Amino acid sequence: MSSPWREGNEFVLLENGEAYYPRVNEAIDQARSEVLIETFILFDDKVGRALRQKLIDAAGRGVQVDITVDGYGSDTLSDEFIKGLTDSGVRLHVFDPRPRLMGVRTNLFRRMHRKIVAVDGRLAFIGGINFSADHLPDFGPMAKQDYAVQVRGPLASDMANYVREVLKAARVARRPWRRVPKLAPPKGDASGRLIVRDNDANPTSIESAYRVAIRGAHHDILIANAYFFPGYRLLRDLVNAARRGVRVRLILQGEPDMKVAQMAAEMLYDYLESAGIQIYEYCDRPLHGKVACIDQRWATVGSSNLDPFSLALNLEANVVIHDREFNQTLRDNLERLMENHCRRIARQQTRKSWLRRPWVSVLVFHFLRRFPAWAGSLPAHKPRLESLGADAIVETGSQESA
């Protein structure tokens, strides 16, 4: 689903946890009526405990607090951690909670991967940053490089409305929002819309937003994405853009937290570079961002990677922004990243292996082309939302469109 275009917003780019967490905590401190949070990961570490205390304090002064976590990403939360929240009046919702089988997590597919914070319907945050200490620089070499955006204005209200509707939909087992017809981009700046990918009516919404923007690009496409293994159609759009003279640059992982993600992306390098696409690998630490800017106005920030999980299985949310000032801020940040912390991958420098042979590329492309249809049949069970806490929504139901 997508919200309509909303004008009259204010957008602030937030880089990494050191910028993001203080803004979120301050917003919760100032909340008067409502705090809504969706996050893939909430850990019992210094970041998670700080958020927990802020939510407990807010509930204590009469603010209605709802936080939804993913049953796969946040399955290590202790009973004590949870009880402290629910005893204070915080309503905790767990997406697709499932017990481990011989220590292995079984809820592998259709994760609730969104990262949204909405406060009083006036201020909201969205991006790729979870509530865990590995988004802070003092975590060490494996600290993640990531982005979020603070939204103030009508779009923030849309984001709050969406999270509320998700919780209501769980109670009555219905879709949270209907599909919104495609709308032409607004002419003014400081405009944005929320785009959500689900496994019901909107399975390709985020991918479609990328493809429309790429096909309409005139000058420049700059994408930074942690897990880059998109479908054939998006790859073809990027190649076609480069061949018609658009400068296309990709910032991908050079020091991955999961080696398989880098190996998958490398399988595409020859195809992309042969069309003139420039590939940079971020080498300081793991890249976790999911951002892009195209030409002078279009930008996106959110939770969606460009890989089969995000594009075909996970529940994701991005904002698309039409704002010259925000576009330039994000572009400047990524330009500095490329100049100071990335290595350019040249064709003659790429590693040669059986994974890079032409017949393997053909197989990979056919797999990518068909993967969404295959993935749509997995798993057989219907994910559910389990709610805890005083006056919580205790009914459970299908959350395919959560």
Image (cartoon, grey):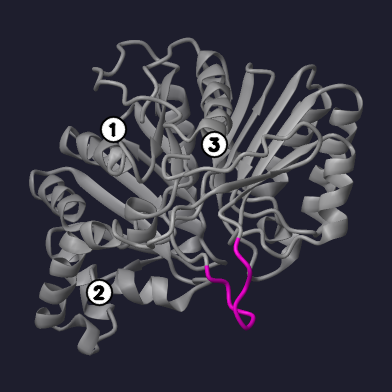
Q: Amino acid at mark 2?
A: Met
- Report the side of 89 relative to 39 (left or right): right
N-terminal label among 2 and 1 = 2
Q: Residue at x 32, y 54 (%)?
A: 312
In percent of width and height, residue 262 lies at 39, 72
Residues at discs 2 and 1 in contact (Cβ within 8 Å): no
Residue 233 in magenta? no
**Residue 222 has which mark?**
none
Locate residue 157: give its quadrant: top right
Position of the N terminus, as image quadrant, is top left
Answer yes or no: is residue 274 visible: yes
Eye-nearest disc, 1 or 3: 3
**Residue 295 has which mark?**
1
Find the magenta span and give its range: 98-106
Q: Amino acid at mark 3?
A: Ala
Eye-nearest disc, 2 or 1: 2
Q: Residue at x 18, y 69 (%)?
A: 367
Eye-nearest disc, 2 or 3: 3
Q: Disc 2 versus disc 3: distance between alpha carbons?
A: 40 Å
Image height of 40 relative to 219, above or below? below
